[in-house]
Every structure is written in structure tokens, then in C-alpha cells.
Amino acid sequence: MSTVTAPAPHRIGRAVLRGLPDLRPSRPSGRAVAAERAPARELAIARAYAYASIDYPGAAQSLVFDTDGTTAVGTFVFDPSSTSSPTTAFTFANGRYEILTVPSSNASILTGINGTGLLIGVYADLAGATHGFTRNGSTFANVDFPGATTTQAIGVNDSGQIVGDYIDAANHEHGFVSTGGVFTAINFPGATSTAATGINAAGDIVGIWSDATNSKGFLLQGATFTPIAFPLAASTSVFGINDAGEIAGFYDDAAGNTHGFIFAGGAFSTVDVVGARSTLLTRIKNDGTVAGVCADAVTCQHGIIGR
């Protein structure tokens, strides 16, 4: 993948962010690394939510990445089977959908919104290059890691710190955090690729790392990485963390089915939308609200907010 792409037909959750291996179900540095969490005793009962579906009118696939409690942000595709149907960023607030038009773009995704209303996302420019962006009020600005060929802005906290990933000249994927425009690379020790996906008010960062076998999540606090892997899962993806340290993401089970999860208080809880073929969580907010996407029996994707 070299650009932002639309989800493919009949494959729910295909990555729409370049280089990010974990927005799709898949089958089978000097920083300290904490011991990986032992699985079995950390399982908790499934969490139940009441879900609201957020589907851009007429779209075949909609994804919700984040919400500030009033506005939900995400992306949609009218026709996933057509190369002329782009991935398009949208907002949903007060019952109204609005397309976010990113200047000089041919595809776009909104990935985050913070408490001040700052929007972040990813777009493909007219030449096909991928950039992160912010929109503050009516002002757009690029988020580009210095020297990178591709940058994606994926998560933001209320202080305006941005996390994401970038591709270097050797085509290797790294995570990053940007604080006041100063970029710092994030690389999980021993990983073949790293992406930072969420950050809370304390600056705790979550993300995804991959090796030759599969992908797992991580938590980065200060200089210490802690791997996060759902017990017995084929792969684990971590996307969101709130100020209480609760973590949201999704995992693939041994049969290739995708489920959302919450990790809190040392225990994992599975989160599934009733009747859905798959559930993916991308954010958990301070009030416990979750955001994400589910797939129905006919492979349509629906953006969701759960409370």
C-alpha cells in the first residue's frame, strides 16, 4: 500500500491507513521492556454497551475513529469496489453529517478530535503522497515527520500532542509523538514495524508493533514499553487510552474472528456488537464511551459509538 486506500469489498476492516497493519482482521532503542502480561487470569466478563450506528448517508462502509462526546469523526466509502470512490473524512454532530474537505487531497480520513476541537487525520495529496494533518478552526496544517516519505497522524490528547506513524526512506515503519511540533520517534524494541495510535493527558502512549509472526499492542509510559496481547489471540491491536489508563482495541481469535476489547485494572474484557460479524474498537473516552466499527452479516461496515 502506498496511499490512503478504501476498504476492499468483502474484507471488513482492511487497513485504510498506510503502513498500519491493524485496522483489518488478519489470520494466522534503549528503552526498558516490561514483562509481557500473563494471559489466563486476566480475562474478565464481556462488557455490554448500548450502541448508536453512525453511517454516512448512502455509504457502503463507514468507520468512526474518535469522538469528543459531541462530535464523532471518521471516514466513509460509497463504493469500495471502485477506484474512483475515494475514502472521505466526515464529522457527525447534532444529527448532521458533514464532509471535511482537505485542501489538495484525493482521499482523507479523520482519526482524532480532542477536547479543544482540534481535528487530526490523514490525507493523500494529488501526487499520491500521504500526510498527517491538523485542522484548528478553519486552518489546516500538515503533520510530516522530518525526512519521512509518509506520515500519518492517528491520535491526539487535549494538550495537542499527536501520535502516529511514518515511513522512512528505507520503507521502514516507525511510530512518533509530536509535542509542540517537535517529533520523537517511537520504536518497540525488536519490532519490524511500530505505530503509535493513542495518547492520554499524562502522555501515556499506546500502539501496535509487529514482528515476523504477528502484531501486538503496547503501552509506553515514560521510557518503559509494556506489550499487550489478548490471551490466546492470533493478533492484538491497541488504539485508544483514556486518562484513567483504560485501553481499547481489538483482537483476532484462532478462528480469524475479530472482537473489540477493553483492558482495565489488569483484566481484559471482550466487546462485541450483538449480531455483528466483527467488532473493532478504536477509542475509549474518560466517561467510558467507546468508538469504532462493526461489520454486519453482508460485510457492510458501520461506525459505532457505545455507551
Image (cartoon, helix red, strand yellow):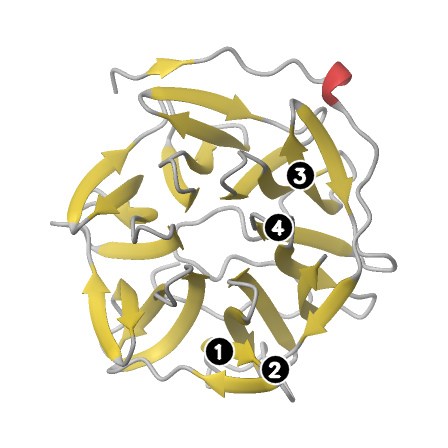
- Assess whether mark 4 and mark 3 are in contact (beta carbons under 8 angstroms): no
- Name the residue furthest top: 35
Residue that mark 4 sits on: 287
- Mark 4 element type: loop
Q: CA distance from mark 3 to mark 2?
A: 26 Å
Q: Nearer the viewer, mark 1 or mark 4?
A: 4
Residue that mark 2 sits on: 56
Residue that mark 1 sits on: 90
Category of crowding for the residue at label 4, using alpha-carbon neighbours closer than 10 angstroms: few (below 14), some (14–19), many (at least 20) = few
Residue 67 lies, with reference to residue 252, above or below; the image says: below
Q: Nearer the viewer, mark 2 or mark 4?
A: 4
**Which image quarter: residue 59?**
bottom right
- Mark 1 element type: strand
Residue 220 lies, with reference to residue 201, above or below; the image says: above
Q: CA distance from mark 2 to mark 1?
A: 8 Å
- Residue 291 spot, x, y in % from top left: 61, 58
Residue that mark 3 sits on: 262
Residue 89 lies, with reference to residue 116, above or below; the image says: below
Residue 127 lies, with reference to residue 28, above or below; the image says: below
- Name the residue furthest right: 275
Who comes first in sequence, dot 3 or dot 2? Answer: 2
Give the residue drawn at x 79%, y 53%.
49
Who comes first in sequence, dot 2 or dot 1? Answer: 2
Seen from the viewer's position, the closer of residues 38 and 162 is: 162
- Assess whether mark 1 and mark 2 are in contact (beta carbons under 8 angstroms): yes
Look at label 2 and name its amino acid.
Tyr
Q: CA distance from mark 3 to mark 1?
A: 26 Å
- Assess whether mark 4 and mark 2 are in contact (beta carbons under 8 angstroms): no
**Which image quarter: residue 202?**
top left
- Mark 2 element type: loop
Category of crowding for the residue at label 2, using alpha-carbon neighbours closer than 10 angstroms: few (below 14), some (14–19), many (at least 20) = many
